[in-house]
Image (tube, rainbow, N blue to C red):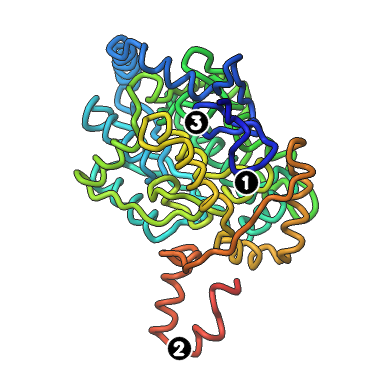
Amino acid sequence: MNNSTSGPIEGIRYCIRCCVPETQEGVQFDTMGICTACRSSEEKMHIDWLAREAQLRAILENARTKSGTGYDCILPISGGKDSFFQAHVLVKVYGMKPLAVTFSHNWFSETGFYNLQRCLEVFDLDHLQFTPARGLVNKLAKKSLSAIGDSCWHCHSGVGAFPLQVATRFKIPLLVWGESIAENDGRASYDQPVHKFDRDYFTKVSARLTAEEMIGGDLSAKDLYPFALPSYEEIDDTGVWGIHLGDYLFWDDERQTEWIRDVYGWRETEIEGAYKGYKSAECIMAGMHDFTCYLKRGFGRSTWQASVDVRNGLLTRKEGFDLIRRYDQERPQALDYYLKITGLTEEQFYDAMREKKVAQLKNIDLPVHPKQRPNAERTVPFVQQVIQKHLHQLDPRVARDKDVNDE
């Protein structure tokens, strides 16, 4: 029986093999009703990974030869599971000398802060980090909702722009990313990658709008300057290009996560809207990002996770849908922090999200359930937690008068 419409949202078509809905951007179903991501997972089994690895080795050796006494490549790093594993591969396996580069969203969780520092220490990495001001992050988080339909434009944009800025200014052509877009994204396959890495990759894949397009209201050109991409001329002059390790190495993020946890002490945590504790562990707002995806497209993080587990034979499709109903539809605690920093009411938030609904969901009321338990970690940036703790130790009256949660 074809049960492609028996998913969590009535009236929406789902892949007959996994849990991917038709509302996923760029997804295509073949004549059998199988989605792009499922077809990509089949392609992955037939790739000659030894030949791919030889290509990777040649790329890295060429970069090392040309770098001379400088850095061999740029390693964009958050301390998350992928970039931690990337650091291991580059440093321990291929003997590269990368420059670690971090765009901080300024929403680091305690676990995320630990993982980043642990990575830098374990692999003895030189490190550059850019952190936008708290007030700017708050303004951008507010505008991001109406601009692109989630809270995270500054992160989508920054993780693309800042490594490119460093690449052009330090003359380091090669950037090495982790997971391939063909892995679980649903918008591309190994056979048809769709998006290659270039100057505009993150604008096309996640940020949607450039820094120049975000100017307006209380956001000036000076405010948005840190998010501006280098010019095409600067990119060409430096010869900047990027690769994803997942296009050259067989990628298994769950096994890789278990390995860096057991070998290097990487830590998982509770991620709101997900039933696994390793994706986006560095950010207190990951659940907020995924909740906005659910409100506009009818799916969140647990849909991605369940779909992978169904493809891998770890769950039945029905079990996957049960997990999706439980986690995707849960109101995240991080929403409270978001409303506080933006000044929006909850009604204004939901009104804005209704405007961003995809066409297939316009006349469908999406269920939202209250969270049944407190989050394992405080949904306040870790740096603010540390400041508040020490203010209280100095003088409890100061802590009461200057509560960082009110900043």
Q: Quadrant of residue 296?
A: top right
Q: Where is residue 339 in the image (x, y as percent from the top left)?
A: 66, 64
Between 117 and 171, which is closer to the camera in this rendering? 117
Q: Mark 2 points at which residue?
A: 396
Between 24 and 20, which is closer to the camera in this rendering? 20
Quick one: SS at disc 1?
helix
Q: Which of marks 2 and 3 is nearer the N terminus?
A: 3
Please tell me how crowded label 1 is: few (under 14), some (14-19), or many (20+) other residues with Cα within 10 Å: many
Tell us which disc is closer to us: 3 or 1.
3
- Look at the image and tell me whether residue 168 can be seen: yes
Quadrant of the frame with the C terminus:
bottom right
Quadrant of the frame with the N terminus:
top right
Give the label on residue 18, or none. 3
Please tell me how crowded label 2 is: few (under 14), some (14-19), or many (20+) other residues with Cα within 10 Å: some
Please tell me how crowded label 3 is: few (under 14), some (14-19), or many (20+) other residues with Cα within 10 Å: many
Quick one: SS at disc 2?
helix
Q: Left or right? Give the position of 247 relative to 90.
A: right
Disc 1 residue type (three-letter): Tyr
Q: Earlier in the sequence, mark 1 or mark 2?
A: 1
Q: Mark 1 points at which residue?
A: 294
Whole-angstrom CA distance, mark 2 to mark 3, is: 53 Å
Residue furthest to the front in view is: 1
Q: Position of residue 406 (x, y in %)?
A: 60, 74
Tell us which disc is closer to us: 2 or 3.
3
